Structures are given as C-alpha cells and as structure tokens.
Amino acid sequence: MAVRASLWREERLAHWDVLLSAGTSCLAEVETLVARSAREETGADRAACVLLLAAARLTCRGQVRGRRNLRAALRYWFSHTGTRDRPDELALDQLEVGGLLDFIGLYLTWPEALATVGVPMTGAINYMALKRAEQQLRKQCAAEWTRLFGSTAPSTLMEGGESFNE
Amino acid sequence: MNDGCCSGRFAQLIAREVSPLEHQEHPGLEKLFDLSSQDVSSETRAELVGHLATCDACRGRWKKLQSHLHDEEAVLCSRVRVPSFAQYIGERSARRRSVPAWTRQLFESKPYIVLAASAATLVLALGVSIPLLRGPALLTSERVAELSGEVQQLRNQIGSSSWTGNTIANGLGTSRGITAQDLTTLDWENPRAYVVEAGEDWQEIAQNELGDERLWPLLWLYNREIVPADASPKAGTTIHLPTPYGG
C-alpha cells in the first residue's frame, strides 16, 4: 500500500509539473488518476489528490487573470519546498516556461512568482492576488471533495493550520 | 503577510507532496541529460519528474547538469553566427538602397552642406595624396646628391693620381690597412730611382725609404714591370720609388 501511495504521489507530481510549466493540464488524465487513487488514499494524500484536481479544473476555465494568479501561487508554494538552491542572479524571464523541478528550492517572493507569469515587478506588491487565488482554490477543493466523497471537506483542508498527517 | 515563509494549508500540502521518498533505483546520467534536452517521451518525463521531485540527490545532479548545459549553450550562442545567404543578400540590398537615399535626401534638404563637405574632402584628399606621391622622389634625389658629395670628397682625399686612385679602387690598400692619407703624402707620378742593396726585400725598402712597412705591396705593384711578380728584388736592381712631397 505504501509503495502504491508513493507511485501515485510521483504521478501527481508529474501532473503538477505540467500544470506549472504549461499553465494547464490534461484534466481527463488527472480525473482518472484521482478517481483511481483518491478512495484508497488516506489523510494528506487524499487531500493532495483533491488539491491537484481542483487546480487542474481551475486552470481549464475561468478568467485569464485568475488562471495566471493561480499559476503564480502554485509556483510560489512549490518554490518554497526542498533544500534552498537559489542562484545569485535569478533569470525570472527564463522561468516563464519552467516546470516543477525548476521551482523547487528557489524560494521565490510573491512578486517574483508573479513575474514568472508575466506580471512586471513594479509598483505596489499585489498580495491580494495570492489571497484571491487561495480562496478560489479552497472553494474548488470543497466542491471536488463533495463530488468525490459525497461529504463536506474536512476542516484540515478548508481551514488549514493543522497537520494533515493522520 | 509574511512573504519569506510559506504557511497555510496548501503550502503544507504541497511541501508534503515533494518530501523525499525512498527510491530503490535512480536514473542514470544519460536519462537526466535526455530530460534536460527535452528529448524524452511524456511518460518518461513524468517518471523522471516524479523521481527527481522526491529525491534530493538526483535533483542536485540534474541541476548541476542543467547548469553545465546552460553555460555551454551561452558559449555557443556567443560565437559569431554566419548569416544565411538570403539574409546576406537582404542586408546587402538594404545597404545599397539606404546610402544613396540618405545622401539624396540630405542634398535636397541642405545642398550647401553637401557641397562644402565635398570640397573639404577633396582638399583633404589632395593635401594628403600629393605629398605622399612626391615624397619618395624628393628623398631619392636628396640621397643621390648626398652620395655624390661623398664621392667627391673621397676623390679630393685620393688626389689627382690615377695610380693611387686605381689602387684604392682595387681594394689593395684598404685590405692592408692603408688609407688614402698614407698615399697622398707621396708623389707616385714622379718616381725616383733606387738601387737595391744586398739582402734587402720589399718590406725593408718600404720601411727604410718610405717610412712605412705596410706600403711594401704598393712598391711591389709599382715595380711589377721591373721585378718578376714571384721574386724578390735582386741586389743591384734599379727600382722606382715614389718621392715624398716636400722631401
């Protein structure tokens, strides 16, 4: 079971990679993966499945600005994972088509994350864009959870602040 | 909002997604290279991304490889690119079109500037080219005059004697260390008679009669019609000697 969970995680990461680099993903493939794995998964892995599905769904619809902000938010969160490995001079323009591996360990600031999706780093920092992307994602996660499991999403996913590990 | 820290539920979930996994096998350098050069199928890429995202060691290797490839690419891009034939022709015709158009436009708008510039260019060209053309000829004639002066000076030093002149010209004197000064102290045109004494040779005669042993070859040459070339002067033979001036 643990091995299978690891394999599913790796599969999900491949989808995250496509989502970060292309800005969209093959929703059908993500749905298949989630349908196959989500019921067997538990705790944080299940929440991760829902999060991937919600993000994949949002990148396939909605306004351009909303999709762009969501992509920036995902890049921002992924950049804050792994061991810090940030070059002295960061070429943000080259990161526009960067994938998951390019962002892990970069520890971008929010304006830098926005710059990777084409928003210039001038003027006031638009933290509201991050907030809105988070709200949008939370709402979509709740909807996907209900659709998949027929119940309301747990507070761990909706409220945050608690550990997902069960 | 604390920008330096990634808090929140999604950030936690995402951080957990890329947390390290225990891998039994690791991709080789060849596969990493293929991934860097985008030369992999989508399935292989998915597998590699899943692995690298959850394996710090492999991700480190891949990043190092990326860095090397990036440096190499920068070096290759910095080299001069050879334009295609079409580009070359296009640029050439553009240049051909642009220069006359520019000058015509300037001539039409400010003709006096063009005329003044042309006149200045012409004057400058003549001013530079004429001295350059005349320069070598002037230098040559000056050099000839200088050499002529030196020749005349040598002639004056040698004096009017054709014999001494020939001697100098043959290089005999110079090869023996005899200078024109040595020769001009003697009158070679009006010789005096000298009877060779027993035991005397050319060196002794030159030393005793002319005061300079070095002059013996000239004596021998001077008397070549009297004394055979391969013999010393015999006692009792009358030979010619130059007369010292004022002597």
Image (tube, coloured by chain):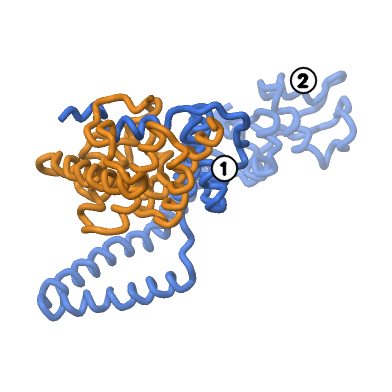
Chain colours: A orange, B blue
Depth order, front residue of B143/B177: B143
Label 2 sits on a secondary structure element that is helix
- Write down the residue under mark 1: B33
B177 displayed left or right of B131: right
For label 2, the crowd category at 10 Å Cα-Cα, with few meaning under 14, some 14 to 19 and many 20 or more, is some
Horizontal and vertical percent position of residue B3 = 20, 30
Residue identifier under label 2: B204
From the viewer's perspective, tell me whether residue B185 is left or right of residue A133: right
Residue visible at 87% across and 28% down? B232
How far, Cα to Cα, is label 1 from label 2? 101 Å
Label 1 in the same subunit as label 2: yes
Choose mark 1 or mark 2, whichever is in front: 1
Residue B11 at x, y percent in the picture: 30, 33
Chain ID of residue with mark 2 = B
Name the outermost residue toward the front: A150
Mark 1: which amino acid? Phe
Question: Which one is earlier in the sequence, the residue at label 1 or at label 2?
Answer: 1
Instruction: Tell me: residue A65, above or below residue B202.
Output: below
Identified at 42% across, 49% down, the residue is: A18
